[in-house]
């Protein structure tokens, strides 16, 4: 029982530390107009022209780019929601799924960043900003990480 409790606290600590990344990334995108009104479009043009996976390029060019300001703010809001959820431990499982889907989108958009024909390890190396976070979110989902040091446990107790 002691090991299980220590593991739960360790995962909760990792959940809280991970929330800081999402909060920092989301805050600057929502607090100022620079990302949604220009920065995001710059990223999109580069993804479409150079690094998006072939099946994902039409999604970016036909759906996201025409509504870039909306999606620019949406990116920040999603990051903030995931960050807040992880920080307070509320709805951690749904937030983990949302975060995984968000990070998969980013991975699909930037996959060819090292260039076509590069060694396989370079694609994974270039995605070290998304793949480790995806793995952490999978762990948070599987461990139901909001139960330790989080409101998910309190919500469960109140329902019982």
Image (spheres, grey):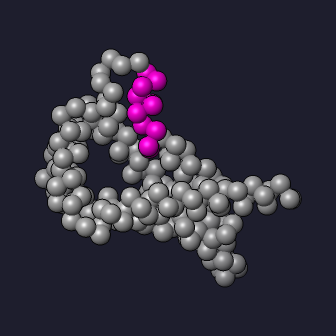
The residue positioned 67% from the left and 69% from the top of the image is: 149
x and y, in percent, of residue 126 in the image: 40, 33
Q: Quadrant of the N terminus?
A: bottom right
Main SS, magenta region, reads helix
The residue positioned 46% from the left and 38% from the top of the image is: 128
Q: Quadrant of the C terminus?
A: bottom right
Q: Is residue 125 visible?
A: yes
Measured along the vertical axis of the image, is residue 31 above or below residue 60?
A: below
Whether residue 129 is in magenta: the answer is yes
Give the side of residue 149 with respect to residue 54, left or right.
right
The residue positioned 22% from the left and 52% from the top of the image is: 40
Measured along the vertical axis of the image, is residue 95 above or below residue 159?
A: above
Locate residue 87: give its quadrant: bottom right
Measured along the vertical axis of the image, is residue 157 above or below residue 123?
A: below
The span picked out in magenta is 120-130
The residue positioned 37% from the left and 40% from the top of the image is: 107
Give the side of residue 76 with respect to residue 87, left or right.
left
x and y, in percent, of residue 117 in the image: 33, 17
Q: Is residue 95 visible?
A: no
């Amino acid at each position: 029982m002691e090991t299980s409790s220590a593991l739960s606290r360790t995962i909760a600590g990792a959940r809280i530390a991970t929330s800081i990344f999402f909060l920092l990334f989301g805050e600057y995108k929502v607090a100022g107009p620079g990302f949604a009104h220009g920065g995001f479009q710059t990223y999109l043009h580069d993804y479409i022209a150079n690094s998006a996976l072939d099946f994902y390029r039409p999604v970016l060019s036909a759906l996201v780019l025409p509504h870039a300001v909306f999606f620019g703010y949406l990116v920040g809001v999603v990051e903030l929601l995931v960050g807040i959820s992880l920080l307070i431990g509320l709805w951690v499982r749904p937030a983990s799924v949302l975060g995984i889907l968000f990070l998969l989108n980013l991975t699909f958009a930037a996959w060819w960043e090292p260039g076509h024909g590069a060694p396989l390890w370079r694609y994974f190396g270039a995605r070290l900003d998304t793949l480790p976070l995806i793995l952490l979110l999978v762990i948070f989902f599987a461990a139901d990480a909001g139960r330790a040091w989080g409101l998910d446990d309190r919500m469960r107790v109140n329902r019982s």
